Amino acid sequence: MNFKHLFSPITINGMELKNRAVMPPMATGYANRDSTVSDRLVSYQARRAQGGTGLIITEVCAVVPRGKGFPNELGIWNDEFISGLAKIPAALHRYGAKAALQLHHAGRETFEAAAGDMPEAPSAIPSAVLGQPCEAMSLERIAEVIDAFAQAARRAREAGFDAVELHGAHGYLLNQFLSPFSNRREDEYGGSDENRMRLILDIIKAVRSMVGRDFPVWIRVSAEEVVRGGYDLAFMQKFAPRMVAAGVDALHCSVGVYSTPGSLSIASMDTEPGFNLFRARALKEVVDVPIIGVGRINHPELADQAIARGDADLISFGRQHLADPDFINKAQDGMLDDIRWCVACNQGCIERLSFEMKTTTCSFNPECGREYKGTTTRAEKSKRVWVMGAGPAGLSAAMSAAARGHHVEVFEKETGPGGQLISASRPPHKAVFMDWVGWALRRLKKSSVMISCNHTISADEIKNRKPEAVILASGAYPLIPPVPGLNSGNVADARDVLTGKVTLQSPAVILGAGYVGMETADYLVSHGVQVTILEMQNAPPVTKLSAHGYWLHQRIREGGGRLILGARVTGVENNKVRYIHRDDIEKEEEAAMIVAAMGVQPANALESVLKELSIPYQIVGDAKKPRRILEAIHEGHRAGLEI
């Protein structure tokens, strides 16, 4: 595949791009606390340019302090920012990429600690997600913000950026003015479609007047909000030509706001790749400027086909740039098997930033965000390293240890590699998780790393062969609480159910509503099994606020599944599960199949042997503490580097 459409050049208002691949804005949290550019951010951006992408758009950059969406968001509200911001285009240009700066105001989608004051918005309606009170902007303040966007565009041009993008999507300030969902004004900036369009059009005109006709300016829009009370695609089709007439050179077609069900603006694995392209095509039908398509697109073939069909002129690959910064060059060189694919898990990127208030990374790429620390160096002395376990932590450790030049052997007690990812890949929409395992195995084969499956390491083997270093990535085994009957033969572990070791029967009762329990329920529902989930906590452990959590709850509910919260299981007998509900009444559920998903505990029995023999070792992944795939892969990677 040569992907001739993706790798053809294109020009946007005199700015020639070497290909049609775009890295869209994705917040990282890498900027300094004073909103200036950090070396970490520059290195991260440059690494993506080095990978071959034609156009890179920075993450959000606040035009006024009160418009910051998070504390260390980039800023451009005065000329003092210019010299620091100039480092970004200078770094990207070295690799032939063009650089655009995204101009942003969060409006009500922020909080006082970030904005430094009460957030401002078209109307005093709190964010549907954050619940943060906000202040309606006066006409004088609106005029100030319009000028702030224009001055920010001027500064971007002076800093050496090739273009600017106005952030008019995802429920931020410009989107808020445009939408009846958030704009209840009755003056010239609200009350009718025409008035709600006014702020964006005024900003476009002000920016264009400031930077001149020869500087590329475009806007990112949510083609529709997909939220009750919001605008639809027909409205955006009516508005798009107005923005072009006002002076934009392209449209970047996203979808949704942060309160859109299922978080479509940063879609999870539950959403089909390219799901938003029909909206890009709808905009392309009404304007004659380039359209940038986006929406869970990670494969060059899908992008090439979309351009060939006329869905869009350029394609934004968002999280794929986090997973593998070299994927564009690899695709151009025909090395698709060497690409580490994004699975849209959202664990390391948007959910880490939004829910955990930590900087962005990638679950499957532990080097994402650490580019400023430099490349992996060879060890002074090659050692014989044993990795016990071929799950995500073990495979990750083996790759990084081999990259250091060590002689690595991997031992796996099961019949094949993959560990917990084997069962994790079986529920609906999660088969992509095994893509990483295949990628890792190909990398290890190139490094001549031997993987021995069906091989349980014994204490005697360690004593006889004496490896020089060991990484314990031996995973975990099911936790069996002291509940009468729970260890009987009619109770199956969730992982055995998912891997086909258990014959499916209906109805089924699942004990535990964590991700394992919920995904097992999703799997069973998809196979026509009637499911009831019993959960001891009074609130769902899997939140509906996450994209994957939202779709899990929806599919289980629509498939007839029941989730009973506040249910403390007291016993299992024959085909019944007894439990005390939150009202202290003892109840029971009939079950032809009982599935335990009540957690796991670390399997690290060989630690005492390693201590006795004074063999250096590290424990990683579930063998250390059962957590997510992010922690497993990242801990394994670090352990391999530290040998």
Image (cartoon, helix red, strand yellow):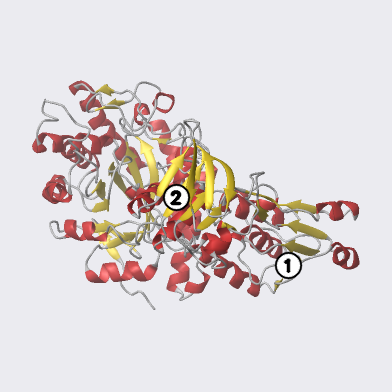
Q: Which mark is residue 156?
A: none
Q: Quadrant of the N terminus?
A: bottom left
Q: Residue 582: x percent and y percent? A: 48, 32
Q: For mark 1, give the secondary structure.
A: strand
Q: Residue 169: x percent and y percent? A: 28, 43
Question: Is disc 1 in contact with disc 2, using a CB cutoff of under 8 Å?
Answer: no
Rendered position, 210 above or below 471 = above
Q: Residue 360: x percent and y percent? A: 50, 45
In the image, farthest residue toward the front = 574
Q: Which residue is mark 1?
A: 411
96 or 436: nearer the eye?
Answer: 436
Q: Quadrant of the C terminus?
A: bottom right
Q: Say left or right for 351 vs 176.
A: right
Viewer-nearest of discs 1 and 2 = 2
Q: Amino acid at mark 1?
A: Phe
Answer whether residue 77 is visible to the viewer in this image.
yes
Q: Say left or right for 566 vs 489.
A: left
The part of the image, by quadrant, that contains residue 292 is bottom left
Rendered position, 217 above or below 391 = above
423 or 121: nearer the eye?
Answer: 423
153 or 188: nearer the eye?
Answer: 188
Q: For mark 2, give the secondary structure.
A: strand
Answer whether residue 638 is visible to the viewer in this image.
no
Counting residues from the N terminus, which is met first, the one under dot 1 or under dot 2? 1
The residue depicted at 15 percent of the width and 26 percent of the height is: 185
Q: Which residue is mark 2?
A: 532
Q: Say left or right for 7 vs 290.
A: right
**Disc 1: CA contacts within 10 A as few (<14), some (14-19) or many (>=20):** many
Q: Amino acid at mark 2?
A: Thr
**Measured Cα–Cα span from mark 1 to mark 2:** 38 Å
**Disc 2: CA contacts within 10 A as few (<14), some (14-19) or many (>=20):** many
